[in-house]
């Protein structure tokens, strides 16, 4: 039956032509945009002062832009490709990319996140130039540090003064954590959710440490605070923004978020609780990759250089070399505001704290 | 003398648990128009699709023009097909529809294709409409377009799947004649599937009557009408009186029953109603065993006999028109 | 041997190969990545197999399992509202004599032209504690939480419900209504006995589409949901808060439930759904009725007015110096920060949306053709149908993370697409696959089943038949599909936020960054640009469809 065989053959041939077309189409799409892996460095140029690096960061967009101007002026031959996302998203992305990291380095991302990456063995220890200037409590404890902090963010109350007056209170009435328990504030406090926000986590762990590690005092306080909370939100800066917009009166957020609202001319005051603030670091780390790009080390050196540090402190007064600025209207040394944070205790207890917290408070509005 | 063009040999086809064709065989001669007639669901369309190669039989074979075609794809069987829905391409003109298939022919010049299309269009009398789109044509014209499209490829045979069912009665009658005359002019072997017995009787050289996945009878229109092989055929084609007599099923057409006198009759009936139908009048009655009977008489005769409802008539059943079937087990 | 040979004869090898290719391609970008993520639901953090332990843990945590009830609750309410509104709105545009139908038809689609984040912003400006309506005392409710999510999801799903009902109601068999009227049936009776049965399949489909969209949406609950937990925010908390991919995968699998349910119901309904409009259907003549028209005009005006307020707020925000303190006109907001990608983000979005539209349309249409128009391969085609509804159930975040796991793996030969525009395009095509598939298969179902048989008999190859007949006849649907892909690719955030690379930033993500940074002016300006482009594309689409229709009408006139 030769007829059949030829027709069968022709059918297969036709089908394979079709079969080739569709993937080709996808490939074309793939090739139409440049790949991030392209490196333009050539052998006769100093590899540490040229080339292209991929930097993941959780710093605010506008700050990234401001800081990078300085880097580009110093290292015009290095092209910096930035991926900026919120702390949670960028950390999730880094973790998901674990098998084949894209980023050369992480810049200005929560130390608590970098601890997770370090546990996963994803960080390459590196001693940037000038690391000796960084205070010990603000960098990794390893001999060759796997991460180095640049500045600190800490729990702060962002208070809408206009709305607060309507309750018959003034900013002076809210100075301490216990002030948040005032019955007038019932339903007027927004706080970030510790299971989705680093700020929420540092606030809760900070409170636990302030009230006494391993005791119920912290939970007792949170139980009472919970009565006054309007909602827990999934972002650290959102409580500050909501206070700025009058959507709530007190936002339990972090310092910079409130200061930015104030700078924008919104009627808010930033209050640091007198008992002290829980805090976390914005920190840098080198990613463990098959080939370490020397330009990434150059960037990390710059990222703790004096010129960089001076820029950081314009926005985050507490910087990790101890040469910080002062907050507007904040009399004492801002470093004194920070509680004695036990990062390893946080790392150990984080899961059980969150579990307990979720069980106690997270279903809040479901009951409504 | 073997004039056979298409051999359908012991075809069986099932869809899941349902048997569509059960050991169906038939032979179709060159140049004849054969109607496959049967009620819906009898398997006739499946048979057509198997002949076309659009379905494959579970067993049995198809031989086209002396060549085993059982395993050939449709494109190698060289047929033209026309569907009830016309299946014209609405985005192409009448001529475009016809050229669409012609372009696949190898070694044909553009001019030859246009000429071929022109011939086909003339054949169905649509040449002046060649630049219209299907939606601009009436149903009958659309169906003629579909026919022209099938013919233009000079197929060895034509398959028509209920081609007239979507049309209204007048157009249908005209198109019957058109199709038949085109088929005879071209001398092209044609298999037409239909559920309309009148269509089959008027158009076909031979009729394959099917029911419940089997062939009941194959024969000329006269044969199946006058000598239905089974009670099904007898009942399905034309009007047929059936009654039981001595363990047999007896069947006789209304026009064949004769009025007899009281001494020399086979049976008698009481008239229930009289239906004037023009030249003929149909008389409905009840046999002594309470079975219905009807007979067609020339209207003048009814007048002459002065038949009335309630009156009794004596009937004679001529032997050469009376069919007897054993009662099916 | 004979059996095999018969089987092979019936087998259209080239069709089988193309069908397989389609299925393989969708499997590779859908099942493989999703499996690489969802398999983690059965592993612990260190990667050991733990069976259902994660599920047991999830259901044992009351706060977490409450999310399931919450999600069903808000999905049901928002589906109910958007179906009622969508039906009413579509009814107004197809079965009444109100004025301004064209205008209403465009404005109904506003929600799909802007990122969902922007809806939420608009809601806060209207109904938040300081919202315009709240301050005027017209909204004495708590927006944040359940109510906010329901309103937001209703806005989000309304255009889908409206479009589905519009298509269903547009074609009516006037004879049915004449018959009902001649029997003296009341309006309500006609509605329940004629209209609803006529569109019952659409009602079921609309229910599942709206329900699934609301069930899996993350944008609204995140911005406006307060502490009302739903499954999508649970995924976020697990993945981006606690970096617990295992638990994230557990919740992700739960999100698939409505899609699988809808597939089952679809099979049940579809097997009985043979009622198509017959060729003899007559045009429905709409009777004059002032009361009816006033009612429906008011309904349309309210819905449209609501959407327009959102746009006006955007326009004010985008074109003023510093709303609400400095209302001077400015175009400064359009000079976007470099760090979010600047104007390049917008052009990147255009490129990506265009590529999504082109490749997505080609793929989805070929895919639907293979599913609808091939004979045999019943099991394969059923599998293909199941594949086609799954993407509807996947939140963008799940697609994003799963794509990282799958495509960024060193051993994956497709690794080269990671970090390029192509992966964004693939993610978008996958994310928005289900609705275009329904459009394409619905359109193909209407084409004569015998075209394929005729072309076989004429020895015309399938691909030629596909290009010369099926594609031209489906042009309106094809345009609709490409528009759908384009518009969604312009506004989507959730999947691509994990996948965009440093040198290919896109506009919708820029908007979220602007909003996070509090640059409402810039966010509004960028939203306006996206809106303009999407409206432009929509107008181009309508013009093209009108052109096609006019061409066919013209043919009819010359009879």
Image (cartoon, coloured by chain):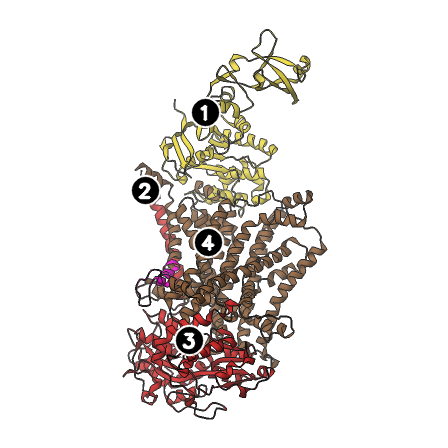
Chain colours: A red, B yellow, C brown
C147 relative to C43 in the view: left or right: right
Q: Are marks 3 and 4 on the same chain?
A: no
Quadrant the N terminus of chain C occupies: top left
Q: CA distance from mark 2 to mark 4?
A: 45 Å
Q: Secondary structure at mark 4?
A: helix
Dot 2 alpha-carbon crowd within 10 angstroms: few under 14, some 14 to 19, many 20 or more: few
Check the residue under mark 2 and report the chain it is in.
A
Judge depth for marks 2 and 1 and give the one in front.
1
The residue beneath circle 2 is A5
- Image quadrant in which the C terminus of chain C is located: top right
Q: Is residue B110 above or below residue B193?
A: below
Residue placed farthest to the left in the image? A143
Q: Which residues are magenta?
A: C29-55
Crowd rating for badge 4 (residues with CA inside 10 Å; few <14, some 14–19, many 20+) = few
Q: Which badge, 3 or 2, is on the more N-terminal residue?
A: 2
Q: Nearer the viewer, residue B314 or C253?
A: C253
Measure the alpha-carbon separation of dots 1 and 4.
Answer: 52 Å
Q: Which residue is mark 4?
A: C261
Q: Residue furthest bottom?
A: A331
What residue would you read off at disc 1?
A: B218
Q: Could you tell me which residue is drawn at 66 percent across and 44 percent down?
A: C180
Which residue is the site of mark 3?
Answer: A87
Asked whether A147 falls inside the magenta stretch, the response is no
Q: Say which mark, if any, is on residue B16.
A: none
Chain letter for mark 3: A
Give the camera-side residue of A11 and B291.
Answer: B291
Q: Secondary structure at mark 3?
A: helix
Labels 1 and 4 in the same subunit: no
């Amino acid at each position: 039956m030769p007829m059949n065989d030829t027709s069968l053959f022709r059918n297969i041939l036709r089908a394979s032509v079709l079969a080739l077309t569709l993937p080709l189409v996808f490939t074309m799409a793939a090739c139409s945009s440049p790949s991030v892996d392209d490196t333009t460095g050539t052998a006769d140029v100093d590899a540490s002062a040229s080339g292209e690096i991929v930097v993941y960061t959780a710093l605010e967009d506008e700050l990234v832009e401001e800081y990078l101007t300085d880097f580009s002026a110093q290292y015009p031959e290095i092209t910096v490709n930035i991926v900026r996302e919120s702390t949670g998203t960028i950390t999730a992305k880094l973790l998901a990319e674990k098998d084949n990291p894209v980023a050369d380095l992480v810049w200005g991302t929560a130390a608590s996140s970098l601890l997770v990456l370090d546990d996963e063995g994803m960080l390459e220890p590196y001693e940037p130039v000038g690391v000796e200037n960084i205070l010990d409590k603000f960098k990794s404890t390893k001999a060759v540090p796997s991460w180095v902090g640049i500045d600190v963010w800490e729990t702060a109350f962002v208070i809408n003064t206009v709305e607060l007056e309507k309750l018959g209170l003034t900013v002076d009435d809210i100075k301490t954590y216990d002030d948040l328990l005032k019955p007038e504030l019932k339903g007027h406090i927004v706080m970030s959710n510790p299971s989705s926000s680093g700020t929420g986590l540092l606030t809760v762990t900070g409170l636990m440490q302030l009230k006494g590690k391993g005791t119920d005092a912290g939970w007792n306080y949170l139980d009472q605070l919970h009565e006054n909370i309007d909602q827990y939100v999934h972002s650290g800066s959102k409580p500050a923004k909501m206070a700025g917009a009058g959507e709530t009166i007190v936002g339990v957020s972090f310092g910079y978020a409130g200061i930015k609202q104030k700078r924008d001319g919104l009627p808010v005051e930033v209050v640091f609780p007198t008992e002290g603030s829980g805090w976390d670091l914005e920190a840098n780390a080198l990613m463990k990759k098959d080939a370490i790009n020397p330009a990434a080390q150059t960037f990390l050196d710059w990222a703790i250089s004096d010129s960089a540090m001076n820029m950081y402190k314009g926005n985050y007064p507490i910087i990790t070399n101890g040469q910080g600025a002062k907050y507007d209207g904040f009399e004492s040394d801002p470093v004194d505001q920070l509680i004695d944070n036990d990062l390893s205790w946080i790392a150990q207890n984080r899961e059980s704290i969150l579990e307990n917290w979720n069980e106690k408070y997270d279903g809040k509005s479901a009951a409504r | 003398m073997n004039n056979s063009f298409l051999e359908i040999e012991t075809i069986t086809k099932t869809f899941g648990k349902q048997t569509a064709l059960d050991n169906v065989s038939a032979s179709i001669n060159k140049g004849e128009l054969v109607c496959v007639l049967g009620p819906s669901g009898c398997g006739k369309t499946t048979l057509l699709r198997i002949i076309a190669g659009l379905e494959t039989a579970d067993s049995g074979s198809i031989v086209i023009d002396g060549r085993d075609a059982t395993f050939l794809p449709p494109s190698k069987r060289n047929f033209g097909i026309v569907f009830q829905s016309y299946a014209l391409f609405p985005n192409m003109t009448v001529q475009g529809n016809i050229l669409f298939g012609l372009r696949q022919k190898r070694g044909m010049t553009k001019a030859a294709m246009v000429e071929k299309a022109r011939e086909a269009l003339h054949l169905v009398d649509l040449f002046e409409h060649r630049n219209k789109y299907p939606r601009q044509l009436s149903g009958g014209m659309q169906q003629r377009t579909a026919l022209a499209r099938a013919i233009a490829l000079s197929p060895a045979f034509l398959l028509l799947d209920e081609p007239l069912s979507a049309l209204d009665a007048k157009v249908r009658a005209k198109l019957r004649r058109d199709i038949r005359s085109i088929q005879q002019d071209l001398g092209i072997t044609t298999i037409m599937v239909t559920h309309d017995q009148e269509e089959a009787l008027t158009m076909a050289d031979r009729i394959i009557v099917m029911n419940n996945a089997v062939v009941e009878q194959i024969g000329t229109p006269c044969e199946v009408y006058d000598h239905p092989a089974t009670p099904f055929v007898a009942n399905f084609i034309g009007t047929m009186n059936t009654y039981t007599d001595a363990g047999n099923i007896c069947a006789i057409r209304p026009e064949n029953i004769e009025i007899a006198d009281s001494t020399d009759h086979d049976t008698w009936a009481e008239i229930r109603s009289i239906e004037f139908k023009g030249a003929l009048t149909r008389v409905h009655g009840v046999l002594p065993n309470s079975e219905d009977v009807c007979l067609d008489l020339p209207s003048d005769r009814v007048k002459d006999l002065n038949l009335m409802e309630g009156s009794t008539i004596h009937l004679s059943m001529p032997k050469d028109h009376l069919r007897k079937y054993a009662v099916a087990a | 041997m004979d059996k095999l040979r018969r089987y092979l004869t019936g087998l259209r090898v080239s069709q089988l190969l193309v069908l397989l290719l389609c299925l393989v391609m969708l499997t590779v970008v859908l099942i493989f990545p999703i499996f690489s993520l969802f398999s983690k639901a059965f592993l612990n953090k260190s990667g050991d197999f733990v069976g259902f332990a994660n599920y047991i843990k999830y259901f044992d945590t009351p706060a977490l399992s409450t999310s399931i009830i919450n999600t069903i609750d808000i999905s049901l309410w928002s589906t109910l509202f958007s179906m009622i509104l969508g039906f009413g709105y579509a009814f107004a545009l197809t079965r009444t004599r109100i004025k301004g139908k064209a205008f209403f038809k465009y404005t109904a689609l506003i929600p799909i032209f802007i990122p969902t984040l922007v809806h939420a912003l608009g809601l806060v400006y209207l109904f938040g504690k300081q919202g315009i309506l709240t301050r005027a005392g017209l909204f004495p409710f708590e927006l944040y939480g359940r109510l906010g999510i329901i309103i937001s999801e209703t806005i989000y799903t309304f255009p889908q419900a409206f479009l589905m009902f519009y298509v269903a109601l547009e074609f009516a068999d006037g004879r049915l209504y004449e018959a009902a009227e001649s029997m003296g049936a009341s309006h309500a009776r006609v509605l329940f006995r004629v209209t609803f049965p006529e569109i019952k399949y659409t009602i079921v489909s609309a229910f599942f589409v709206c329900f699934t969209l609301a069930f899996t949406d993350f944008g609204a609950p995140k911005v406006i949901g307060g502490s009302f937990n739903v499954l999508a925010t649970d995924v976020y908390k697990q993945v981006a808060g606690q970096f617990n991919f295992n638990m994230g995968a557990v919740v992700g699998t739960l999100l698939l439930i409505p899609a699988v349910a809808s597939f089952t119901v679809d099979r049940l309904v579809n097997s009985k759904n043979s009622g198509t409009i017959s060729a003899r259907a007559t045009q429905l003549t709409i009777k004059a009725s002032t009361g009816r028209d006033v009612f429906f005009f008011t309904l349309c005006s309210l819905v449209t007015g609501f959407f327009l307020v959102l746009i006006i707020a955007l326009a004010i925000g985008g074109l003023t110096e510093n709303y609400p303190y400095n209302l001077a006109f400015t175009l400064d907001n359009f000079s976007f920060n470099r760090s979010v990608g600047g104007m390049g983000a917008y052009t990147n979005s255009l490129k990506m949306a265009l590529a999504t539209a082109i490749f997505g349309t080609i793929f989805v249409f070929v895919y639907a053709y293979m599913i609808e128009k091939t004979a045999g391969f019943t099991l394969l085609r059923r599998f293909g149908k199941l594949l086609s509804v799954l993407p509807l159930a996947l939140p963008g975040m799940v697609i994003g993370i799963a794509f990282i796991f799958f495509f960024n793996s060193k051993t994956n030969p497709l690794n080269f697409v990671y970090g390029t525009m192509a992966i964004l395009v693939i993610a978008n095509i996958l994310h928005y696959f289900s609705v275009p598939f329904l459009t394409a298969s619905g359109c193909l179902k209407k084409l004569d089943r015998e075209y394929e048989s005729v072309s076989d008999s004429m020895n015309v190859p399938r691909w030629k038949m596909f290009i010369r007949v099926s594609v031209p006849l489906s042009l309106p649907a094809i345009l609709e599909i490409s528009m759908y892909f384009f518009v969604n690719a312009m506004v989507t955030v959730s999947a691509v936020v994990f996948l965009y690379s440093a040198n290919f930033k896109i506009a919708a993500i820029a908007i979220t960054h602007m909003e996070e940074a509090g640059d409402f002016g810039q966010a509004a300006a960028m939203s306006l640009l996206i809106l303009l482009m999407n409206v432009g594309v929509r107008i181009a689409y309508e013009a093209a469809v009108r052109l096609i229709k006019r061409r066919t009408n013209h043919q009819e006139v010359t009879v």
